[in-house]
Amino acid sequence: MSDPVHIVCPHCDAVNRLAPARLADQPVCGKCTRELFMSKPIDVTSARFSKHIERNDIPVLVDFWAVWCGPCKMMAPAFAQAAQRLEPRMRLLKVDTENVQDIAARYNIRSIPTLALFQGGREVARQPGAMDAGSIVAWAEGNVRP
């Protein structure tokens, strides 16, 4: 039997323990009883960002973007489509670099959109520039560490 994995609730940020085999069974949060996977990206603040990066045992893909950025707006639907294809194997977050400047500064985000992949609380890959959904999925899956 596999060790349980920790999944942070996208609604209340409670950390849930699940058997890896149950990830695809539409699990719900033990605290707020809402779904743990919504097949869409989650907009996060600084505190929520840290919790999702540090406490999720699944990889976390982050889209660093800004509301005024044309390429970011163009990529937003593709990132949402990628969420439908990557969850529950991966959590997808969106960080508005204008509203969450401390996170953008901490990770030295110099251009947007920028995708960053985190595993075990650490950044493992980064890709600047807009991409289509298929490219996002392929890039994310290709950079996941075993």
Image (cartoon, rainbow, N blue to C red):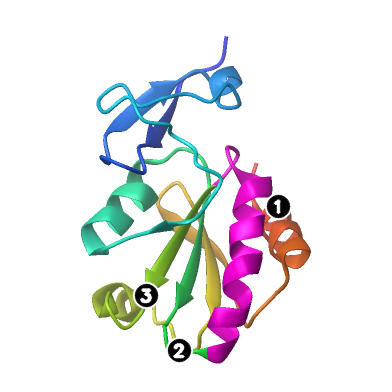
Residue 145, visible in the rendered structure: no
Residue nearest the observer in this picture, 4 or 70 = 70
Q: Label for residue 62?
A: none
| Residue 27 in picture, x, y percent from top left | 47, 24
Mark 2: which secondary structure? loop
Residue at the extreme top of the image, as rendered: 1
Q: Residues within 10 Å of mark 3 (few under 14, many from 20)?
A: some
Instruction: Please tell me whether residue 134 is drawn above or below residue 36 in the rendered image.
Output: below
Going 59% across and 42% down the picture, which residue do you hit? 87
Q: Nearer the viewer, mark 2 or mark 3?
A: 3
Quadrant of the rendering where the N terminus is positioned: top right
Residue at the extreme left of the image, as rendered: 47
| Residue 142 in picture, x, y percent from top left | 73, 56
| Residue 112 in picture, x, y percent from top left | 51, 85
Dot 1 and dot 2 residues touching (CB under 8 Å): no
Residue named by callout 1: 141
Residue named by callout 3: 96
Going 31% across and 83% down the picture, which residue do you hit? 98
* Left or right, 124 with reference to 140: left
Which amino acid type is shown beneath numbered disc 2? Arg
Q: Earlier in the sequence, mark 1 or mark 3?
A: 3
Which amino acid type is shown beneath numbered disc 3? Asp
Q: Give, as a single range, the part of the protein colored magenta.
A: 70-90
Residue named by callout 2: 110
Dot 2 and dot 3 residues touching (CB under 8 Å): no
Instruction: Please tell me whether residue 111 is drawn above or below residue 139 in the rendered image.
Output: below
Q: Magenta segment: does it hold 35? A: no
Q: Residues within 10 Å of mark 2 (few under 14, many from 20)?
A: few
